[in-house]
Image (cartoon, rainbow, N blue to C red):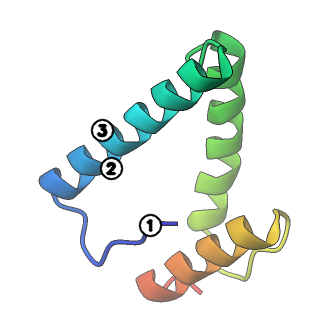
Amino acid sequence: SILAQKITPATLGALIAYYEHMTFTEGAIWNINSFDQWGVELGKSLAKKIQSELETSGEVSGHDASTSGLINAFKKKAGIN
């Protein structure tokens, strides 16, 4: 997991490049299309749920422990909780 103190253009660009490279490399190793539409739609669906949870106060527990922990840590740092 990666948490940054401040999101700058350089930080955001590095994160996007990192995840694109990781996604491509894993797909090549596993011989799958990492950028198939089904996976993209699933990602959008999950992101919408998490976005709404980031915008409301209160602790989150409806995900696996890692995801819930990261959402709650972000909300605490951002003063949302």
- Confirm or deny contact between disc 2 and disc 1 (CB under 8 A): yes
Which mark identifies residue 48?
none
Residue at 69%, 65% (x, y): give it. Answer: 67
Q: Is residue 24 left or right of residue 5?
A: right
* Image quadrant where residue 36 sits: top right
Query: Pointer 2: what residue?
Result: 15
**Vertical side of 11 occupied by 18: above or below:** above
Say what secondary structure mark 2 lies in.
Answer: helix
Q: Is residue 20 above or below residue 13?
A: above
Residue 60, horizontal then vertical, whole percent: 75, 74
Which of the pair 34/53 is nearer the observer? 34
Q: Amino acid at mark 3?
A: Ala
For the residue marked with disc 1, what is the amino acid? Ile
Mark 2 and mark 1: span between their CA atoms?
A: 9 Å
**Position of residue 80 measured from the top left corner of the image (x, y, whole percent):** 52, 82
Looking at the image, is 51 positioned above or below residue 24? below
Crowd band around label 2 with a 10 angstrom C-alpha radius: few (<14), some (14–19), many (20+): some
In what element is the residue under mark 1?
loop
Question: Which residue: 52% across, 66% down?
Answer: 1
* Residue corresponding to mark 1: 2
Q: Quadrant of the C terminus?
A: bottom right
Residue 35, quarter of picture? top right
Residue 10 lies, in percent from the top left, at 14, 53
For residue 17, the mark is 3
The amino acid type found where label 2 is placed reads: Leu
Q: Closer to the N terminus: mark 3 or mark 1?
A: 1
Cβ atoms under marks 3 and 2 closer than 8 Å: yes
